[in-house]
Image (tube, helix red, strand yellow):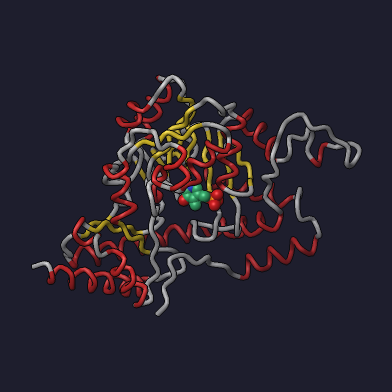
Amino acid sequence: MNIPFGKPVIGDEELAAVERVLKTGILVHGPEAEFFEKKFSQFTESPFSVSVSSCTAGMHLFYVASGIGVGDEVICPAQTHVATAHAAELAGATAVFVDVDPLTGNLCPEKLERALTAKTKAIAVVHYLGVPSDMDEIIKIAAKHDLKILEDCALALGSKYKNVHTGLLGDAGCFSFYPVKHITSAEGGMLITKDSNLAAKIRHLRAFGVDRSHGERSIPGLYDVNDLGFNYRMSEIHAAIGAAQLEKLPSFLKKRKSNFQYLSDLLVNADCKGLRIVPQINNDVKQSSHYCLSVILDAQLALDRASIIRELNADGVGTSIYYPHPVPRLSFYANKYRNRDLDLDRLVATIFSDQSIALPVGPHLDLGEMEVIASSLIRAIKKRNLGSL
Ligand SMILES: *Cc1c(COP(=O)(O)O)cnc(C)c1O
C-alpha cells in the first residue's frame, strides 16, 4: 500500500496542454497566461488576477508595489511557511511574529493588536490549512491603524469568508501552484486583488519594470525601463497546466471534503485518547478548502511522535508536518532576531510544529485509502493508550 501525502492528479488534459504550447513555440508572453488569469478571476470572482512564478514571488511583489520595505514592520503568524515571512524580509521589511489560535492555528486578533508599533505597515494573514482567518476582526484592526492586509492563500484555494473567496478580503491574496497544493502548475502562483492600480503595478514589476508590455511595443524589442523590477513571470507551459488543473478544481475540492469528513469520522468514532483533529470549519461564515487532516497529539503522545510517524510510513501512509517549526525558531530568524523577547517554548505555534501529524486527503486518494490511514493511526495510538494505563 502506498498512500503519498501529496501527488498531483495529472491527466491527458495537462499532457495535451503542454504539447499544444510547445508546438506553438510561444513559451512566454502569450495567450496561455492571460487565459489562466481570466479563468482564475472567474473562479474566485476577483476583478484582477496576475500570474507569477510562485506564491512567494507574488507576496514579494505585493510589498514592493505597496512601498513597504526598509524600516517597516509586517505582522506574520508564528505558525506558517517560511515564505510568509521571507516575502516581507526580501522587500527589506522586518517580520514581526504573532502567536496563533490553539484550535485553528490562525492569527489571534487580540495578540495581533498588541504587537503593533508605529512602524507596522501590513498584516500577512495566513489561512492555515485552508481555514479562513477571523477577517472581520483583522480588517477592523487594519482599518483603525491604517495597515495593508496581504492574504497568504497558498493552502486556501476554494476557501471563502462570508461568501467572498479568500484573497479578496484584504488588499491582495496570493495562491501557490506548487505540486502538493490544491492545483499545480509545477511551480507557479497567482495574485488576486480588487485594486486596479495595484494589479497594474504588480504586472509592471513582475517583468523587470519595463514601461510597456510585449504587446504594446510598436517597434519590436524597443522599450524603456522605469523601475527596479523582477523576472517573476509565469511561462506559457506552466500557465497551460494550471488552466487545465483549474477545470478540475471543483471536483478536487469535493473529493478533499468527502475524504476529510470520512477520515475525521473514522478517527472520532475510534475514540483514541490524546488525539484531536484540527477542524476544517464549514458554517455560514467560513468555508474551508480541506488541505489536509492534521491531528494534534497530547504532550505525552507527542514525545513519541517520530516513532508514530515511522509506523504510519511503514504502513505506506505518507505524512507531513505543517509546519516543522514556528518561523521565529528557524535558524535564520532565530539568529537575526536573537534579542527579541519572544519566548519560543511558550508559543502556541509549537503545538502545531511539535505535536501535529498531517494526513493526506487529496484528490489522488479515495475513501478506501482513508480507511487504511485511519486504521494505521488508530493502531499506533491505541497501542500507546494501553501502555499508559
Ligand atoms: C507552500 C506555501 C507557500 C509557498 O508557495 P510557493 O508557491 O512555493 O512560493 C507560501 N505560504 C504558505 C502558507 C504555503 O503553504
Tell me which corner region of the image, top left, top right, bottom left or bottom right, holds residue 296: bottom left
Whether residue 154 is visible here, answered yes or no, is no
- Left/right of residue 165 with respect to residue 78 in the rendered view: right
Total numbered circles: 0
- Left/right of residue 90 with respect to residue 220 in the rendered view: left
Image position of 341 with respect to 129: above or below: above
Whether residue 40 is visible here, answered yes or no, is yes
Q: Nearer the viewer, residue 332 or 16?
A: 332
Q: Position of residue 52 (x, y in %)?
A: 63, 46
Image position of 82 with respect to 11: above or below: above
Q: Position of residue 249 (x, y in %)?
A: 51, 57
Image position of 67 with respect to 336: above or below: above
Identified at 76% across, 63% down, the residue is: 22
Q: Residue furthest left?
A: 389
Q: Position of residue 339 (x, y in %)?
A: 39, 33
Image position of 120 with respect to 300: above or below: above
Q: Nearer the viewer, residue 310 or 146?
A: 310
Q: Position of residue 376 (x, y in %)?
A: 28, 74
Identified at 58% across, 45% down, the residue is: 190
Q: Nearer the viewer, residue 190 or 82?
A: 82
- Which image quarter holds the C terminus? bottom left
Identified at 16% across, 62% down, the residue is: 273
Identified at 58% across, 28% down, the residue is: 66
Q: Residue furthest bottom?
A: 1
- Which image quarter holds the N terminus? bottom left
- Left/right of residue 198 with respect to residue 353 in the rendered view: right
